[in-house]
Image (cartoon, rainbow, N blue to C red):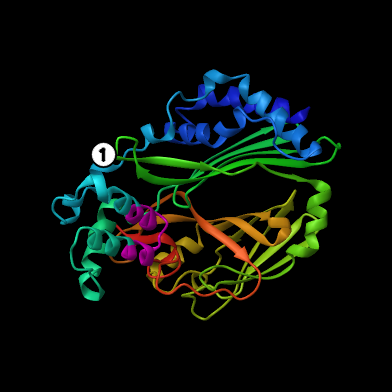
Amino acid sequence: MRVLSAFGVFLAAVAPAAGKDITADTLAVLHDVLAPYRTSRDPGAEQHGRVVAAALDASSEREAARPASPAGRFARRGRSVRGARWGWGDVRPDFSLNEIASVRDALVRQDEAAAGEAIQALYVKMGRTKPEGAALAPLLAAVGKIVGRAPPETDRTEIEGPGYTIVVENARAAGKAKVSVLMSKGPDGRPARVSFAGDVTIRPDAAGRDLAARVAPAAAPDVMTAAEAEDLEQKLKGKWRDRHGGEYEISIEGENVTVAHLNPSGLVPPQARHYRGSYRVGVIRARFEVSRAEELHAGLPAAVRAQLARRNFGFDIRLEAKDRGARLDGTWSSQHVTYSPDSGHPIEKIHNPYDVALVLTRGDLRVAEGGRWPEEGGPEGVSPA
C-alpha cells in the first residue's frame, strides 16, 4: 500500500537528517504525537482503519528513528521563566509553575490578554494584590522581554516521493504538531490523507520543579478520502469567522481555492487580502503575496513596508476541514523581520516563518476583548533591531 512506503521513506529520512532538517525537540514532540497509536489497532472505520493501520505498521519498522526521550526533556524552560527573573521575588514552584507555564504559553501564542490573566492568577495564588491596568503593563513587558518578542519559528519539513508527500510540522507558536501523509492513491485508488496531530503546551515536569513540553495527542488520526473531500466542497464555500472577529470568505473551484480575509486590521486604506492556493483532500493551502506597501500594517514604518513589498514577502494559511466541514482548523504564517532604526530603516534580516493558530467557524462569534493578534500592535511580528 502506498502509505506503507510513504511512512517508511519518512522514517528512513528522519534518522540521518535529524540534526539538519528536523530538530531534537520536534522529533521528541512527534514521538509523543504518535505514541497512542503504537498500542491501539482500532483507529476507525474499516476503510479508514486500513490506511491508518498501514501507517502505524510502517512506523514500527524504524523504531531506532524515534527519540527515546519524551518531548519534555528537549524543552526545559524553567530557568528562563522563574519568578525572580520577572521581579516577583521567590515564587514557590510547588504551587506556581502551572501559572508561570500559562503566562509563557499565552505570550508565545501572541495573546497578551491571556498572559495578563495568567499573571493576575499567579499573584492571587501568591496572596498578593492582583495587578490591573497600569500595574499590569510593566509585568507583561518584563515577561515579554524574557520570552522574546519574536514568535518561535515553525519547524516544517516536506518529503516528496512518487505518489505521496509527507509533511512534518512543529508549529511552536501555535502549539500544534502534526505528521501528515498525502497520497495520490489511497485504498480506493484515489487521493487520501492521514494526519496524526497533537497540542503542545509547557507544563510542570513530573518532579514539579521545572517546566517541560507536554503533548496531548488527538483522540484519533484525521483521515480524509477524495470522495469525502468532494462532498465537503460545497459546505466549505462562503463566510467564516475567527475568534478575534476576523471575517473570511472561501471560494473553491476544483482544486483552486481563494480565501478572502475581508477585514484585516491596520490597513490604510481598509482592504481585503486574497489568499490563493489549492484545496486537496480536505486541506486548504493558500498564500497572499504582498505587492504594495499599503498591504502591510500601517503601524510599520513606510520604508520597511516598501522594502518588504519588493522582497516576495507574504502570509500563508493552512486549514483542515473538521467536524464534517463545520470547522476549519489550522495556522496563519508570517515572518518576523529585524530592521535598523537608522534613516531608511534598512532590513537586516527576514527570519524563518512562524505559525499561529487559526480556527474558522460559521456564524457570529464573540470577539475576544483585548488580546494581541499578529496584525495588531506589532504588525506581522515585525520589530526594529
Q: Is residue 217 left or right of residue 281?
A: left
Q: Is residue 11 left or right of residue 99?
A: right
Q: Quadrant of the C terminus?
A: bottom left
232 in the magenta segment: no
Is the stretch drawn in magenta largely helix, strand or loop?
A: helix
Residue pictured at 39% horizontal, 35% vertical: 72
Residue 275: quarter of image: bottom right
Residue holding disc 1: 209
Residue pictured at 42% horizontal, 66% vertical: 379
Amino acid, disc 1: Arg
Q: Which span is picked out in magenta?
A: 102-117
Neighbour tally class for label 1: few under 14, some 14-19, many 20 plus, Cα within 10 Å: few
Can residue 341 be spotted in the picture? Answer: no
Residue 325: quarter of image: bottom right
Q: Is residue 206 left or right of residue 40?
A: left
Residue 70's spot in the image, x, y percent? Answer: 43, 31
Residue 238: quarter of image: bottom right
Residue pictured at 18% horizontal, 64% vertical: 128
* Residue 89 or residue 170, whichever sits in front: 89
Vertical order, 344 against 269 (above or below): above
Residue 201's spot in the image, x, y percent? Answer: 42, 47
Can residue 227 be spotted in the picture? Answer: yes
